[in-house]
Amino acid sequence: MPTIAQILRLTSSPQSILFLGEGDFTFSSSLLATLPPSLLSQTITPTAFDTHGEVTRKYPSTSATPISNLKSLGFPPLFRVDATKLPSSLPPGGGGGGQVYSRVVWMFPHSGQQRVHVNRQLLSDFFEVVGSVLGDGGEVCVCLSEGRPYVDWGVVERGEENGFYCRGEAKWNSSSNSKSSSNSKSSSSKKKKGEGLEGYAHVTTLGKEAYAGQEGVMEGKRGGKGAVVYSFVRKIKKIKEKENEEGAGADADVDMDVGGIGTGIFLKDSDDEQEEEEEQEEEEEEEKEPKLSKNQRRKQRKRKR
């Protein structure tokens, strides 16, 4: 299984990366520690929704070290950055002054409420504005835990509604070897050797004190599930309406702004798999009935439908 750095394609040439929803900053800090010095020359902007004081209060035992590490690397964290209000909540030079990024990463977004419709809206609001800080050929990566209720949030549909195409999904083993918290705007638990990030532990959006005396509650909800990283690119042409023979309907004529994407990590799209299956069926039919003409085979397939 690929590492999270490979899934996010951070191991290639230097680029500009925006990390959103960094609860206690253990994710970005631990991730950057795995990158070679040559890749630390890129523009990296770790951000949190909370103020510095709120981060310290919510995560008193985990936030100080990663924040210090990020500063020493030359990537001081930004606070009070709302993923649904980009770029206005980014300061000048941090995306608010017209800066754009080649990659925007949001690990385990969560509203803090266990309400499907609220989290759906959170994702919709995010996709509505993220394009304003995304450069040409840029990519948006959103990571969610597997299973329900996360699949009910419809992250792919939320992206589609706002002009983004999900070019693939990649599984990441985010199961815990020790006790961990649940979903948040930040990170998950320590991972198995070879797959995880040393020093990275999942924290909840509301912070530890919100679940005082309920340590088993949030762990149980996440249950050591794996995670899925969804990779999105912008549609650079709107769907064009085309008249069919009946005078109604529309065919999708969409170009994706894929700018050099394609590492073999992401799974095939379902449409591609369906096309391959149909082509294979046609080839098998031709092998079985080599003496039939093309018109005869076409008529035969129509009868079967």
Image (spheres, grey):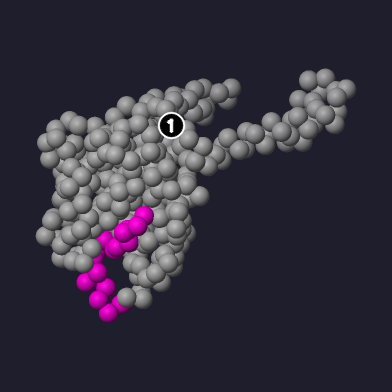
| 160 with respect to 113 (left or right) | right
x then y, percent, for residue 246: 57, 25
In this rendering, the answer to whether 215 lies above or below 199 is below
- Residue bounds of the magenta highlight: 197-214
Q: Quadrant of residue 85?
A: top left
Element under disc 1: loop
Q: Nearer the viewer, residue 11 or 238?
A: 11
The residue lying at 42 percent from left, 27 percent from top is 260
Q: Is residue 152 magenta?
A: no
| 91 with respect to 105 (left or right) | left
The residue lying at 19 percent from left, 36 percent from top is 95
- Amino acid on which the number 1 mark rests in the picture: Ile
Residue annotated with mark 1: 261
Q: How many marks?
A: 1
Q: Is residue 202 magenta?
A: yes
Q: Residue furthest front?
A: 37
x then y, percent, for residue 144: 39, 53
Q: Main secondary structure of the magenta part?
A: loop
Sort mark 1 into few (<14), some (14-19) or many (20+) by Cα contacts within 10 Å.
Answer: some
Q: Quadrant of residue 190?
A: bottom left
Q: Residue furthest bottom?
A: 213
The residue lying at 27 percent from left, 79 percent from top is 213
Q: Nearer the viewer, residue 18 or 35?
A: 35
x then y, percent, for residue 138: 34, 32
The residue lying at 21 percent from left, 67 percent from top is 61
Q: Nearer the viewer, residue 202 or 71?
A: 71
Q: Residue furthest right?
A: 291
x then y, percent, for residue 252: 49, 28
Q: Nearer the viewer, residue 17 or 292?
A: 17
| 71 with respect to 220 (left or right) | left
